Amino acid sequence: MSSESSERIPFQTLMAESAARRGDNPAVHTVNGSIPWSAFYQELCRIANGLRGLGLQRNDKVATLDYSTVPHLSLYLGTALGGGVSVPLSAMATSEQLRAMVKDCEARVLAVSQAMLPLVEPWLDEIRPQLLPNGLIAIDFDGDGWTSMAAWVSEQSDAAPDLISNPDDGFNIIYSSGTTGTPKGILHAHSMRDFQISRMSNFGLGEDAITLVSTPLYSNTTLVAVLPTIAQGGQLVLMEKFNEAQFLELAEKYRVSHAMLVPVQYQRLLDHPDFARRDLSSFRMKLCTSAPLRRQVKEAVLERWPGGLCEVYGLTEGGVSTTLNCGEFPDKLHTVGRPAEGVDLRIIDEDGNELPQGEIGEIVGRSGAMMQGYHGRKDLTEAMYWHSPDGELFYRSGDMGRVDDDGFVELLDRKKDMIISGGFNVYATDLEQVLLAHPQVRDAAVVGIPSKRWGETPVGFVVGTELDPEAVRAWANERLGKGQRLAAIEPMDELPRSVIGKVLKRELRDDFVKQHPDRVD
């Protein structure tokens, strides 16, 4: 990792050079118009100088809560220019989770939009003592005890801050999408973001890119595409919230070249009646991450949507990363590709022994992009570690998989979601692929339900039209091995998903057990 970090160009330097080079060329587009590079960079500098004027020190945390707006993006980037650590908070979190995150990251500044105000009001008095004086920033409203962002920023100098971050300085904290308790704060250093900015240039994310941003700023999925584009002088097309019709309209209007999407977005866009009517010929590369993109959807994207398609598998924590150029390897669409450049990926068993190619185990990896750790949680950080026989540090992914004869990684299941039925390991992915081959099934998820007879037994949750659950179950079980057979099929209008498209399997499991306590013996 040392060789990559020694050649780094600091983020502050990249931004200053891009602003000088791009001048009046557009930096950010929204439904309301465009902002030129010169004005955008001046705004970021004012925010950086304003934060330092409040007393923000190097590596102090700035927590933000808003949709994907220009002010929110500006706060995120301006914090980095000023040497602070950005903490974009999830708009999907509960008030209590947000309180825990703000306290956990030890935020010195909290910036909130009016739409999010009800989520923070119950605990504002409790966290005031940890904030800097005037450290409550009102993004788009006026209120007692709040610093108006517009007025505050307008008073600041637009000179570039005289500060260059060290490689080990914090860049941001991204909170994991945990569904219970306090999510873990994943701390990324400047060195990790510098490495990713350089690596993502391989996909064309740079000065010539026009990148459409339709996932939330608190998701690493979003930032992996945003940072390379903006740091190197490209253009961002920013959506506050994802909407299929608006996505297609903006893509055509601004001649978008790149987008990072999650699987559910691809399906919704392909299904939208405007898809075939919009001119999408400007696309050069579309990327997908956060959850597996199913083969049928990959095939449809390659057939119907101009430009390349690349699936990226990885962790917000870093270490593990693979890429699949779908057009280049049409016979490998069931995989997530080969290890990305600079990634050492291996498969280990339950006891931490490395497994040979072709065998199933947990995926571990190391690269130049690895988090500093979970903020304030040394125990959880060290629980991720796996050390190779020669002492190198790898991160555990928690995912089960195997590497095929050509070096492509087949992703099977989350380790915690693997079904153990009658003493045998059952991988939900295998069963889901069979269900998705049924002509009436549009979406499917399989989870393990407690069973007195088998320990766990697979149950399929399917979305489709005019489904006969027993007929689907019989059809699938004819094509599955004896130890894989489904105990039940549960029809659904749609599968519960997180905001970045991951199926909430715990929710499916808990709801099924609650509603059908005697359904599966």
Image (spheres, rainbow, N blue to C red):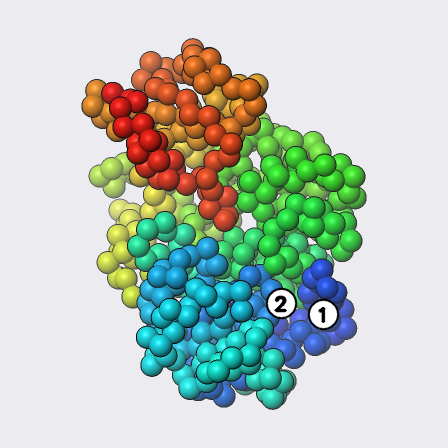
Between residue 291 and residue 398, name the one nearer to us. 291
Gap between marks 1 and 2 measured at Cα: 10 Å
Q: Residue at x 56, y 23 (%)?
A: 465
Q: Residue at x 30, y 32 (%)?
A: 513
Within 10 Å of disc 1 (Cα), the crowding (few <14, some 14-19, many 20+) is some
Q: Are marks 1 and 2 in contact (CB under 8 Å)?
A: yes
Q: From this viewpoint, is residue 400 visible? A: no
Left or right: where does residue 149 sit relative to residue 119?
A: right
Which kind of residue does numbered mark 2 sit on?
Answer: Val
**At which x and y percent is residue 408?**
48, 34
Q: Residue at x 52, y 76 (%)?
A: 138
Q: Quadrant of the N terminus?
A: bottom left
Which kind of residue does numbered mark 1 sit on?
Answer: Ile
Q: Which mark is residue 397?
A: none
The part of the image, by quadrant, that contains residue 474 is: top left
Left or right: where does residue 345 sit relative to residue 288?
A: left
The residue beneath circle 2 is 70
**At which x and y percent is residue 399?**
37, 40
Between residue 6 and residue 322, name the one nearer to us. 322
The part of the image, by quadrant, that contains residue 328 is: top right
Q: From this viewpoint, is residue 130 visible? A: yes
Q: Residue at x 74, y 49 (%)?
A: 249
Left or right: where does residue 24 sit relative to residue 455?
A: right
**At which x and y percent is residue 92?**
46, 55
Q: Which mark is residue 35?
A: 1
**At which x and y percent is residue 180?**
32, 51
Element under disc 1 = strand
